[in-house]
Image (cartoon, rainbow, N blue to C red):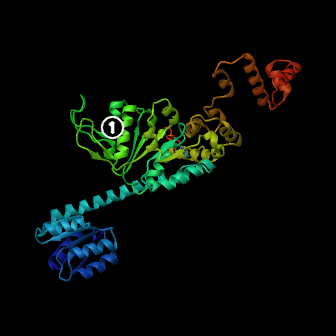
Amino acid sequence: MKSILVVDDDTLIRKTLSSHLTKQGFEVQTAEDGESGLRKYAEMGPDLVFLDIRLPDADGLDVLRQMKNLSARASILIMTAYDDMKTTVEAIKLGAFEYLVKPLDYIAIDLAVEKAFQVKALEEKVSYLVEEKQKEYTIDNIIGHSSPMREVYKLIGSVANTRTNVLIQGESGTGKELVAKAIHYNGPYRDEPFIVINCSAISDTLLESELFGHVKGAFTDAVSETRGKFEIAGKGTLFLDEIGDVSTNLQSKLLRVIESRDFMKVGGEKVMKTEARIIAATNHILHALIESGKFREDLYYRLKVVEIDLPSLRERKEDIPELVGYLVEKINRELRKNVRKVPPDVMKLLTDLPWKGNVRELENALTRAVILAKGDVVLKENLPLETEERKLFSRDLVSLEEVEKEYIQYVLAAVKGSKTRASQVLKISRPTLDKKIKDYALEI
Ligand SMILES: Nc1ncnc2c1ncn2[C@@H]1O[C@H](COP(=O)(O)OP(=O)(O)OP(=O)(O)O)[C@@H](O)[C@H]1O
Ligand SMILES: [Mg+2]
């Protein structure tokens, strides 16, 4: 049951409020002055307080301040005998939820109570959601204990509390966005927005207006003024994904914002300031782009105050079993499935594959295997793997000899080194097989 404390020196108000609110199903207590009001507040920890701003023994604002200090949980409604705006504004500044002017009427009381509880519920929900969101991006959700990953964690830890620009480089699917979020959600401005802009997905003009906003009439479709992401981000983070794809024209504009922190809307004249932190990411080798004149070197240096290079999955194979465990668990949870067993031979295969698309490709492969599974086991045949055979025919053109050499090697591996089996499969004699093994220096 929700509890309400009424603090007023007027007996009639205490009585009427108390009986009205009790009838509405609340647990109500009353106090006739500041001192007993504060004592009861501390004892009962109410959800809501009706506080008279004029009390016989204390300044109501002072009581409000002390209540807020004791616990910020309660919503506090101020009651004023006349419309004393100055005190009311002061009370709201101190964190009072609302004020009611005496004489009180039941409709105003009921509305204020309803609003207080609605806002409270919403606040709780929001803080729960924010917490959930933050949990999603704690460093714990980035998997891997290999030494390149340990370097990454160190860097995340050292930049999270700063406002420095960060450049994250890594192949596709290595977790660039995940790392950017971890930096944001572990920093002091975690409650401010984290905004992603994919610089390669949209045209130059559109990207410029996305970033800076535009004024009405700036171009044909600009029917109304818009706010750009630099403005919307506040003190939060602007994640510029695929920064290597930004045109040189826009690179100059970005350089200006980063250096001076000011910018103008497209078509606008007013200079605006941004406080957003910038995290940029790329899977291009920016150095190569600089050499070919496609990326400004000065911008590169401004962006990479701190540089985080994410290792490919091939460079941290030892993390694969742990990642598989984590991803299988995550996929099962999301799909409400129960396919959690990964046999050792499947795990070995998963560890040995090249994973050009890195963690994302591994996650997609496992998702498919979980969906297709009939029992509770991740099966090899359900993994969308490029089999050795398919690889053999889907690559650069090579000589027949090269193909023969690789195929014999493949068959030998498949029959676990049994030359008899291999010659049967290949339909060649044992001596021919022996000769080819020798000529091609194959391993058995
Ligand atoms: N170390 C990791 N631990 C757990 N999950 C990871 C890890 N790295 C990446 N992932 C997961 O892999 C997927 C791809 O990650 P993310 O989107 O961050 O990659 P990216 O580098 O931004 O890729 P792209 O360049 O293709 O945009 C996400 O679902 C992410 O949660
Ligand atoms: Mg990405």
> What amino acid is found at the position of numbered circle 1 in the picture?
Glu
Left or right of 406 on screen, residue 178: left
What residue did someone put label 1 on?
210
Q: Secondary structure at mark 1?
A: helix
Where residue 295 appears, as percent x and y from the top left, is 45, 34
State yes or no: Cβ of the residue under disc 1 lies below 8 Å from any atom of ligand 2: no
Left or right of 233 on screen, residue 270: left
Q: Nearer the viewer, residue 214 or 106?
A: 214
Q: Residue at x 53, y 38 (%)?
A: 173
The image quarter containing residue 4 is bottom left
| Quadrant into which the N terminus falls | bottom left
Q: Nearer the viewer, residue 320 or 284?
A: 284
The answer to whether 35 is drawn above or below residue 404 in the figure is: below
The image quarter containing residue 18 is bottom left
Left or right of 169 on screen, residue 443: right
The answer to whether 402 is drawn above or below residue 383 in the figure is: above
| Quadrant into which the C terminus falls | top right
The answer to whether 395 is drawn above or below residue 310 in the figure is: above
